[in-house]
Image (tube, rainbow, N blue to C red):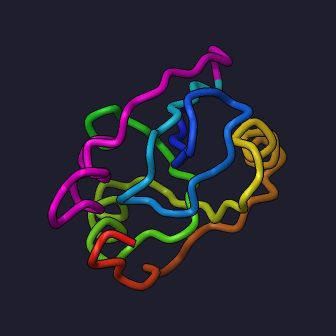
Amino acid sequence: MKIALSSSGKDLNSYLDLRFGRCEYFIIYDLEKEKFKVLENKGKYSSGGAGITSAQQLIDESVDGVISNNIGPNAYELLNSSGIKMYKGKNISCKLLIESFKANELEEIKEAGPSQKGGH
């Protein structure tokens, strides 16, 4: 099982980026192998549709879950229709969020957050 975290940096000590579509990086963590890789978010510099670009990037990586905070309506729909579960994270390290995920302590996101048009 692979989960993606919206991250402000390139390692597990980086804090969660509370934005989804405009986050700096995605950390893709493989729970079986206990390994991760880092992807630069392709949606970060998008002039429009950042959430969709980011969601498609994670679908292409075959992730099973996403940990972020605010997932806009278009990205939410795309991830949801692809069977990817979304979980609400806090402004703490990605490492701690992975541990919380393993302990089944994260709240599942059941509805889209507000749209962040304009790059916020």
Q: Residue at x 57, y 54 (%)?
A: 17
> Residue 114 at what x, y percent from top left?
42, 85
Q: How many marks?
A: 0
Question: Could you tell whether 108 is left or right of 117 in the image?
Answer: right
| 86 shown above or below 73 | above
Asked which quadrant contains residue 98, the reply is top right
Magenta stretch: give its range: 32-58
Residue 56 shown in magenta: yes
Between 75 and 19, which is closer to the camera in this rendering?
Answer: 19
Q: Residue at x 46, y 39 (%)?
A: 26
Asked which quadrant contains residue 41, the reply is top left
Between 26 and 64, which is closer to the camera in this rendering?
Answer: 26
Residue 112 shown in magenta: no
Q: Residue at x 57, y 66 (%)?
A: 69
Question: Could you tell whether 101 is left or right of 82 in the image?
Answer: right
Instruction: Tell me the quadrant of the picture where the C terminus can be found.
Output: bottom left
Q: Residue at x 24, y 48 (%)?
A: 56
> Residue 107 at what x, y percent from top left?
70, 67
Instruction: Tell me the quadrant of the picture where the N terminus can be found.
Output: top right
Single out the residue that lies furthest toward the bottom: 114
Between 10 and 5, which is closer to the camera in this rendering?
Answer: 10
Question: Could you tell whether 20 is left or right of 30 in the image?
Answer: left
> Residue 54 at what x, y percent from top left?
30, 51
| 15 shown above or below 106 | above
